[in-house]
Image (cartoon, helix red, strand yellow):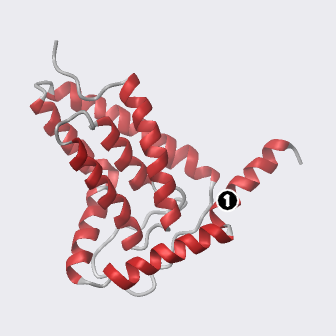
Amino acid sequence: MNLFTTALGAARRAPSTPLVARFDGAVDGFFGRRLRGRPAWDRVMYAASAAGEHSLVWLAIAGAEGWRARAPGRTLARAVVALGAESLLVNGAVKSVFRRPRPAAGKPRPHYLRQPLSSSFPSGHASAAFFAAALLRDSPLGPAYYALAVVVASSRVHVRIHHGSDVVAGALLGACMGEAARRAFPVLSRRP
């Protein structure tokens, strides 16, 4: 067995260590005891999860920020390209390394939710949310975008589509990629 095969095998097993399992159990237990099953929280979390599908909420925000910066077409085009590249990398390349099963739903879900077929690790919703928040952080509403990113990312645990560690890994990956992309390819820029 060569070094690459050994490293790939270790990477695929990483999300299932005992420490990660305890963390995931604690996070799921918190949502189960405190939030999941409460109608108001269920509506908010299912809506946040749906809004994060295909980065629709982030593209809408980028479009609105473009109007504010008087560069709507450019801002939206840059956001589409940046979020598309992030999605290809995370949902294509990174997820293909891991074959982590998604959490079992347990009982019927109170609201409709699209069931993804890809690996659970890392969370693409969390990655896109923190990537977009980093791209948009120079806006006066930057802190609100990070707050929305937290809601979208945590909604994936609430609706039992991701484990807590999937969300943390996705958020960290998205935030790091977003900072790099923000410097190299600024989404918010005023017309010259």
**Three-letter amino acid code at the position of disc 1:** Ala
Q: Residue furthest right?
A: 1
Looking at the figure, which quarter contains the C terminus? top left
Task: Please tell me which residue is depicted at 44% across the width and 69% down the height of the picture.
Answer: 161
How far across and how far down the image is residue 92, in percent?
Answer: 53, 46
76 or 172: which is nearer to us?
A: 172
39 or 84: which is nearer to us?
A: 39
How far across and how far down the image is residue 167, in percent?
Answer: 46, 59
Q: Residues within 10 Å of mark 1 (few under 14, many from 20)?
A: some
Q: Residue furthest top?
A: 192
Q: Is residue 93 above or below residue 85?
A: below
188 or 2: which is nearer to us?
A: 188
Q: Is residue 50 above or below residue 32?
A: above
How far across and how far down the image is residue 48, in percent?
Answer: 26, 62
Task: Please tell me which residue is depicted at 27% across the width and 37% down the height of the picture.
Answer: 136
Q: Is residue 102 above or below residue 184?
A: below
Task: Please tell me which residue is depicted at 20% across the width and 35% down the height of the picture.
Answer: 139
Label 1: state its secondary structure. Answer: helix
How far across and how far down the image is residue 165, in percent?
Answer: 52, 63
State how many labels appear.
1
Residue 62 occupies which quadrant of the picture? Answer: top left
Q: Is residue 182 left or right of residue 106?
A: left
Q: Is residue 137 left or right of residue 4?
A: left
Task: Please tell me which residue is depicted at 74% across the width and 55% down the height of the picture.
Answer: 10
**Residue identifier under label 1:** 14
Q: Is residue 68 left or right of residue 105?
A: left
